[in-house]
Image (cartoon, rainbow, N blue to C red):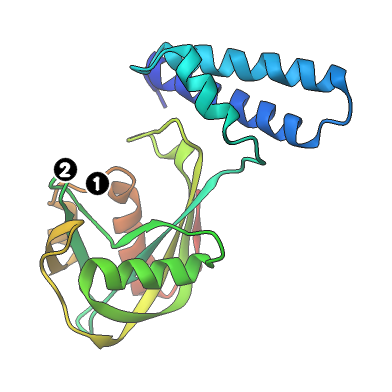
């Protein structure tokens, strides 16, 4: 899997930032603090190589959030109808298609995040039934980002509400077959997750882990 140099620099900077902020959070003496301060400055300088902001501004932002850093958790809702079609939404920003989903909020379980995102993006009330997939964004091979994320895909059943076709985040919503889905321009990791969701839903298989 090949990634461009800029993305790799951003990834390494993000890892260094995590090491530094976690180290500063738990530091017990001045020697540790000095070392992790230096690591944080290096992370900011590396980030500035692939960012429009200079290293000093980035370092100020980093130091404003000295807290334990872990991968971000995101959740998607795989909503199927009685004909086995999957509900996809079209994103406002790119025009590409994806399952409803987004980042989980603090205090919110991944399944609750999938349920909330489904309602916000489609108007449908759903219930999360089982996990269809767990994905690490560093393995996607497409749309790799600097921020490390885990994505969980939940099979969800509709319990109420009504389908909205336009929201702040989406411009359209469509029930699609497998063949129709893969013919659409799918957003980043959904090029992997959507076909996998169809396969696991059809055969009742266990979660897909990547």
Label 2 sits on a secondary structure element that is loop
Res 103 label: none
Report the residue at 46% width, 60% height from top: 133
Q: Is residue 6 left or right of residue 118?
A: right
Residue under the point 23% across and 80% down: 81
- Quadrant for the N terminus in the image: top left
Kindly identify the residue that appears in the image at 18 percent across and 58 percent down: 168
| Residue 34 shown left or right of residue 91 in the figure | right
Q: Is the residue under label 2 in contact with that under label 1 (CB below 8 Å)?
A: yes
> What residue does disc 2 label?
94
> In x, y percent, where is residue 40?
63, 20
Looking at the image, which residue is at 34% across and 82% down? 157
Query: 188 or 110: which is nearer to us?
Result: 110
What is the crowding at mark 1: few (fewer than 14 residues within 10 Å), some, or many (at least 20)?
many
Q: Is residue 140 above or below residue 112?
A: above
> Which badge, 1 or 2, is on the more N-terminal residue?
2
How far from the left and from the top, in percent, is residue 184? Answer: 13, 51
Q: Which residue is mark 1?
A: 187
Coordinates of residue 70 in the picture (x, y in percent): 61, 43
Q: Nearer the viewer, mark 1 or mark 2?
A: 2
User: Quick one: 162 or 175, which is closer to the camera?
Assistant: 162
Snapshot quadrant of residue 78? bottom left
Q: CA distance from mark 1 to mark 2?
A: 8 Å
Q: Nearer the viewer, residue 39 or 129?
A: 39
**Local secondary structure at mark 1:** loop
Q: Position of residue 47 (x, y in %)?
A: 47, 18
């Amino acid at each position: 899997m090949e990634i461009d140099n800029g993305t790799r620099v951003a990834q390494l900077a993000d890892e260094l930032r995590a090491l530094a902020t976690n180290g500063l959070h738990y530091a017990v003496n001045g020697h540790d603090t000095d070392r992790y301060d230096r690591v944080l400055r290096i992370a900011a300088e590396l980030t500035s190589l692939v960012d429009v902001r200079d290293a000093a501004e980035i370092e100020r932002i980093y130091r404003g959030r000295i807290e334990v850093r872990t991968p971000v958790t995101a959740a998607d809702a795989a909503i199927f109808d009685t004909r086995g079609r999957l509900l996809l939404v079209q994103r406002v920003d790119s025009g590409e298609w994806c399952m409803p989903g987004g980042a989980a909020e603090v205090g919110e379980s991944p399944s609750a995040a999938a349920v909330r995102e489904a309602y916000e993006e489609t108007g449908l009330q759903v219930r999360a039934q089982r996990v269809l997939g767990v994905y690490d964004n560093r393995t996607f091979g497409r749309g790799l980002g600097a921020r490390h994320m885990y994505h969980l895909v939940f099979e969800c059943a509709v319990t109420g509400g009504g389908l909205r076709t336009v929201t702040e985040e989406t411009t359209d919503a469509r029930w699609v077959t497998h063949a129709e889905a893969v013919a659409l321009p799918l957003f980043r990791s959904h090029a992997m997750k959507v076909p996998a969701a169809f396969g696991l839903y059809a055969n009742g298989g266990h979660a897909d882990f990547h």
